[in-house]
Amino acid sequence: MTRLTILAIVLSVLPSATTAASRTQSPEQKCDDTLQMPQPVKAALKRMPDVAVSCRLKPTVIEGDFNGDGRPDYAVLVVQKASQKRGFLLTFGNGRSLIAGAGRPVEYGVATSADLNFDQWELYSKSKPVESADHQRLLKLHGDAVLVSYHEGASGLFYWDGKRIRWYQQGD
């Protein structure tokens, strides 16, 4: 093949490849200007300028007691600005905050991922019994957790173990 033929083939395939890539992740939905963030979340976001709040799911902010200290904590959907990788910011009442996903690797399902592609999330109270997937130890939560699911099928909990965010598989 000549160089011109190879170049023509590459140029004809390139538009379809970029179109397919853009379909794999829909763009983040812009947040409404009236979206109110709790003060601890605003402060945490100022310290992490590489992420922005994402409004791709409702609610955007979940309030709970994720570390079990009796003070309100917040989980907020975020996206890494440069890569558009999705995740969430966890802000504790003591001022500490960290990000799961959004370009930062975290255990998610059977692997580690920097892009959390769940399409539903909600607060999971520490007072509720935790359902366990097969061949998995029982989990007793010491704080609230975030229940996430993907296409109403696979689900699991993100919870704080006192040192880091952990994953606990629930359904397939």
Image (spheres, rainbow, N blue to C red):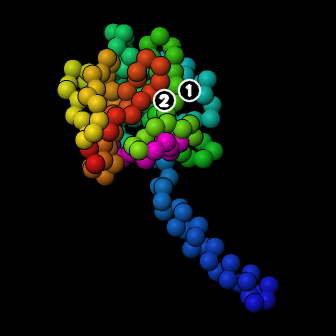
Q: Nearer the viewer, residue 71 or 160?
A: 160
Work out whether residue 145 or residue 133 is closer to the camera in this orientation and state it: 133
Amino acid type at circle 2 is: Leu
Q: Say which of 95 and 133 sits in front.
A: 133
Residue designated by label 2:
89
Above or below residue 34? Residue 2 is below
Secondary structure found at label 2: strand
Quarter of the view holding residue 120: top left
- SS at circle 1: helix
- Residue visible at 29% across and 21% down in the picture: 141
Please provide percent x and percent y for residue 108.
Answer: 43, 41
The magenta-colored residue range is 111-122
Q: Is residue 1 left or right of residue 78?
A: right
- Relative to 163, residue 109 above or below: below
Query: CB atoms at circles 1 and 2 under 8 Å apart?
Result: yes
| Image coords of residue 54 (percent x, y) | 47, 39
Q: What residue type is labelled 1?
A: Leu
| Residue 5 falls left or right of residue 54 | right
Residue 9's disc is: none
- Residue 23 in view of the camera: yes
The residue under the point 44% across, 27% down is 165
Label placed on residue 45: 1
Q: How crowded is mark 1: few (under 14 residues within 10 Å), some or many (20 or more)?
A: some
N-terminal of the pair, mark 1 or mark 2, is: 1
Q: Position of residue 153 (x, y in %)?
A: 27, 50
Q: Nearer the viewer, residue 18 or 55?
A: 18
Q: Is 45 part of what is drawn in magenta?
A: no
Residue 62 in view (yes/no) = no
